Image (cartoon, rainbow, N blue to C red):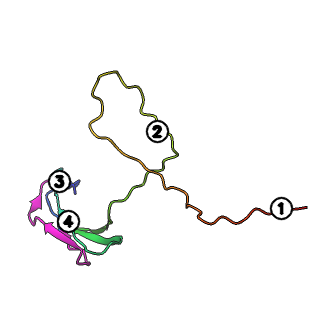
Amino acid sequence: MTNTSSYPQRIRFGAPATREFRLIDSPDTATASGLDVIVEIEFFTTVEKEYSDVLTVYTEHDRMTIPITASLPKSRMIFDGHLDLGMAVKESSIFGQVLTLTTPQPPLITNPAPPLILI
């Protein structure tokens, strides 16, 4: 949060309401014009779902809310089966990590229905 006013302001943060989010450090000193205030929010859960809450910011003349969300990491990549890795130079080390992509296999049919013969 940056103090964009022309005079020092006290910027305070209200803790999120849900217990999964926790305000770690909330400075309570006046912030000079043009300087930043950094706040750290910790998130912890044992349930796999998406969480949302708000962080409330109070200044001497204003109050605002900032939405915060957290969820487990998940893949958001769409892969059509073709991957262009560009040009590789022979005997050079260009990859620091190998990414293995797999596509789901179609279901295996163990007892197919007999073919229909139309006369």
What are the residue bounds of the magenta stretch? 13-32
Q: Residue at x 10, y 64 (%)?
A: 27
Whole-Å distance between the Cαs marked 3 and 4? 16 Å
Question: Tag 4, which secondary structure?
Answer: strand
Q: Position of residue 77 (x, y in %)?
A: 44, 51
Q: CA distance from mark 3 to mark 1?
A: 78 Å
Upstream in sequence: badge 3 or badge 4:
3
Residue that mark 2 sits on = 83
Q: Are marks 2 and 1 in contact (CB under 8 Å)?
A: no
Q: Which amino acid does the dot numbered 1 rest on?
A: Ile
Distance from disc 2 to disc 4, alpha carbons, whole Å, reads 38 Å
Q: Please, which residue is most extreme toward the top here?
A: 90
Dot 2 alpha-carbon crowd within 10 angstroms: few under 14, some 14 to 19, many 20 or more: few
Residue 117 is marked as 1
Residue under label 4: 41
- Mark 1, secondary structure of its residue: loop
Disc ID at residue 32: none
Q: Identify the mark nearer the N-term, 3 or 2.
A: 3
Residue 103 is inside the magenta segment:
no
User: Where is 72 relative to 35, above or below?
Assistant: below
Q: Which mark is residue 36?
A: 3
Residue in the picture at 73% in, 64% down: 114
Nearer the viewer's eye, disc 3 or disc 2?
Answer: 2
Between 105 and 8, the one nearer to me in the picture:
105
Q: Tell whether label 2 touches label 3 (CB within 8 Å).
A: no
Give the mark toward the camera: 3 or 1.
1
